[in-house]
Image: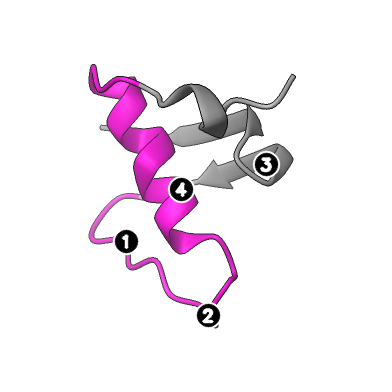
Amino acid sequence: MLAQLTISNFAIVRELEIDFHSGMTAITGETGAGKSIAIDALGLCLGGRAEADMVRR
């Protein structure tokens, strides 16, 4: 089970921690809130490849 996702220097996110709890988790929010960024970061954890322009320097 995934307990926490930490995102650092990815897209527009400098630092973010998301805690997951047992059961189903729904990611919701306004347009531009970063939902897709969180899902993209999770994809990287699962072996996906990052595009160079998504990584902050």
Can I make out residue 20 in this image?
no
Lower position in the chain sequence, tag 4 or tag 3: 3
Whole-number angstrom distance, CA of label 4 to CA of label 3: 9 Å
* Mark 1: few/some/many CA within 10 Å (<14, 14-19, 20+): few
| In the foreground, 7 or 11 | 11
User: How packed is label 4: few (under 14 Cα within 10 Å), some, or many (20 or more)?
Assistant: many
Nearer the observer, disc 3 or disc 2? 2
Disc 1 designates what residue? 25
- Residue at the extreme bottom of the image, as rendered: 30
Kindly identify the amino acid type of the residue bearing the numbered disc 4. Ala
Q: Nearer the viewer, mark 3 or mark 1?
A: 3
Q: Secondary structure of the magenta portion, mostly?
A: loop
Q: Which mark is residue 17?
A: none
Question: What residue did someone put label 2 on?
Answer: 31
**CA–CA distance in space, label 3 to label 1:** 17 Å
Q: Quadrant of the C terminus?
A: top right
**Residue at numbered disc 4:** 38
* Amino acid type, mark 3: Leu
Report how far apart the C-alphas of labels 1 and 2 lie in the structure: 19 Å
Q: Which tag is nearer the camera, tag 1 or tag 2? A: 2
Label 1 is placed on what type of residue?
Thr
Contact between marks 1 and 4 (CB within 8 A): the answer is no
Residue 13, compared with residue 9, is above or below; it is below
Q: Would you place residue 35 above or below residue 51 in this image?
A: below
Residue 26 drawn in magenta: yes
